[in-house]
Image: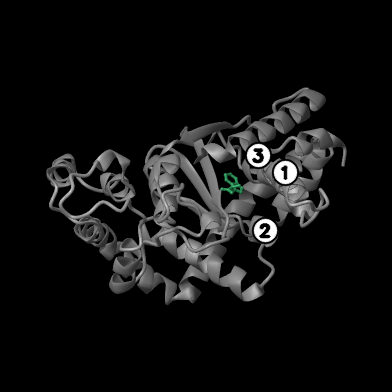
C-alpha cells in the first residue's frame, strides 16, 4: 500500500510563486508516489480573515491554483477543511490530551506575544483562541487521515512535532496504535525565494509575485524588484542579486550561465536583467495562467469537485472518529 501524504494551504492571501515552488509543485510531485490528501485550511484562515467575501474569494483562488497547476482530483483527495465536521470533533478530542504549556511554547503564538511586548501592548492583544489552539486544529487535520508524511516549509516543523506529541499521548493512554504517527517532509526551497524587497517571499511582507497576473502587470511588478544602484556600465555580481536569485529558480543551467556572463561583463542595466527574468516567468506561467482563468471562472465546477472530495474524505474521517469514540468510551 502507498504511504499517505497530506498537506493544507490556508486561504489568507493570493497564491504567489513562493507557494508554487515551495509547496504546490513539490506536493504534486509527491502525489505520484504517495496516496495524496491535499486540502484548503479555511477554518485556519478564519482566525485572521473576518470579511466573508475575502475568505470566500481566497478559498476559490487557492482551489483554482492547485487545479491550474495540475492537481487531478481522480488521483488526489482534494477537499475543504470546513466541509469535514469530524475534523472539529477530533480537534476537541485532541484538546483533552494537549497540555496548555505545549501551546504556550508554539513559535507562531510566541511571535505574536513577543511583538505585543515590543509594542508595549498587553500580551494577549489581538490573540484569539483560534490562534492559540492553532496547532491542535492542525493536528486534527493531520491525524484524521492516517497521515505518514506532511510536506511543509520549515516554519511548520514544530506544528508537526506537536501533532506527534498529541498522537503519542493518545496511543499511550489507550494502549494501542489508534493514530498514525506523522513525519514532516521539510522543503527548504521556500527559504530561498526572495520577494520584491529581497526578504523571503511572504504575504506577510507584502512582497509577493502572483504567477497568474496578466502579462503587463507581471512585467510591472518584476520591474519593481529591488537591486543595488550600480550603473549600466559596471560589472555586477549575480550571486548578490534578487533578480538573478529568482531567475535561477526557473532557468536552465545554460540560460543561467548566459545571464551570469552578462552580469559580469558590465554594460547590462538592471532593466535588462529584469526583462530577462520577466520573459522567463511569462514563458513558465503563461500556460498555467490560462488554466487558472478558465477554472476560476467556473466556480460551480470547483464547488462540485470540492463536494465530491468532501464525500470521499468523510468516509475516512467518520471511521477515524468512530475508532476514537469507541476507544474512549464515548
Ligand atoms: N499551518 C499551515 C500553514 O500555515 C497550513 C495547514 C493547516 C497545514 N493544517 C495543515 C499544513 C495540516 C499541513 C498539514 O502553512
- The vertical placement of 246 against 186, above or below, is below
Could one spot residue 133 in this view of the protein? no
Mark 1 or 3, closer to the camera: 1
Q: Is residue 10 left or right of residue 250?
A: right
260 horizontally vs 140: left or right: left
Q: Position of residue 68 (x, y in %)?
A: 37, 62
Nearest the eye: 271 or 259: 271
Say few, some or many: other residues with alpha carbon within 10 Å of mark 2 (under 14 / 14 to 19 / 20 or more).
many
N-terminal-most mark, 1 or 3 = 1
Find residue 14 and report its horizontal and vertical position in percent: 49, 63
Q: Determine the image quadrant of residue 50.
A: bottom right
Q: Which mark is residue 43?
A: 2
The answer to whether the beta carbon of the residue marked 3 is less than 8 Å from any atom of ligand 1 is: no
Disc assigned to residue 114: 1
Do the residues under discs 2 and 3 have CB atoms within 8 angstroms? no
In the image as oriented, which residue stretches furthest toward the right?
A: 329
In the picture of the structure, the residue carrying the numbered disc 3 is: 143
Amino acid at each position: 500500500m502507498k504511504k499517505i501524504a497530506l498537506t493544507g494551504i490556508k486561504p489568507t492571501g493570493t497564491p504567489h510563486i513562493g507557494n508554487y515552488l515551495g509547496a504546490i509543485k513539490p506536493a504534486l510531485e509527491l502525489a505520484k508516489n504517495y496516496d495524496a490528501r491535499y486540502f484548503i485550511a479555511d477554518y485556519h484562515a478564519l482566525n485572521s480573515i473576518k470579511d466573508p467575501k475575502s475568505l470566500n474569494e481566497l478559498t476559490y483562488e487557492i482551489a483554482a491554483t492547485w487545479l491550474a497547476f495540475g492537481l487531478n482530483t481522480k488521483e488526489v483527495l482534494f477537499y475543504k477543511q470546513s466541509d469535514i465536521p469530524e475534523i472539529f470533533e477530533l480537534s476537541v478530542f485532541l484538546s483533552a490530551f494537549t497540555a496548555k504549556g505545549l501551546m504556550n511554547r508554539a513559535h507562531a503564538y510566541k511571535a505574536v506575544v513577543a511583538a505585543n511586548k515590543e509594542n508595549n501592548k498587553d500580551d494577549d492583544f489581538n490573540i484569539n483562541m483560534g490562534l492559540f489552539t492553532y496547532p491542535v486544529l492542525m493536528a486534527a487535520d493531520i491525524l484524521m487521515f492516517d497521515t505518514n508524511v506532511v510536506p511543509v516549509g520549515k516554519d511548520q516543523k514544530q506544528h508537526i512535532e506537536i501533532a506527534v506529541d498529541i498522537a503519542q499521548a493518545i496511543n499511550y493512554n489507550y494502549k494501542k496504535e489508534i493514530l498514525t504517527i506523522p513525519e514532516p517532509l521539510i522543503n527548504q526551497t521556500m527559504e530561498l525565494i526572495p520577494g520584491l524587497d529581497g526578504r523571503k517571499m511572504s504575504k506577510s511582507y507584502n512582497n509577493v509575485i502572483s504567477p497568474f497576473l496578466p502579462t503587463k502587470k507581471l512585467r510591472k511588478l518584476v520591474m519593481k524588484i529591488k537591486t543595488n544602484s550600480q550603473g549600466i556600465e559596471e560589472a555586477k555580481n549575480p550571486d548578490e542579486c534578487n533578480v538573478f536569485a529568482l531567475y535561477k529558480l526557473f532557468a536552465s543551467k545554460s540560460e543561467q550561465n548566459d545571464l551570469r556572463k552578462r552580469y559580469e561583463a558590465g554594460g547590462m542595466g538592471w532593466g535588462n536583467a529584469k526583462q530577462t527574468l520577466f520573459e522567463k516567468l511569462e514563458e513558465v506561467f503563461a500556460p498555467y495562467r490560462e488554466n487558472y482563468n478558465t477554472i476560476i471562472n467556473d466556480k460551480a465546477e470547483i464547488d462540485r469537485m470540492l463536494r465530491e472530495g468532501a464525500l470521499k474524505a468523510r468516509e475516512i474521517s467518520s471511521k477515524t472518529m468512530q475508532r476514537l469514540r469507541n476507544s474512549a468510551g464515548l
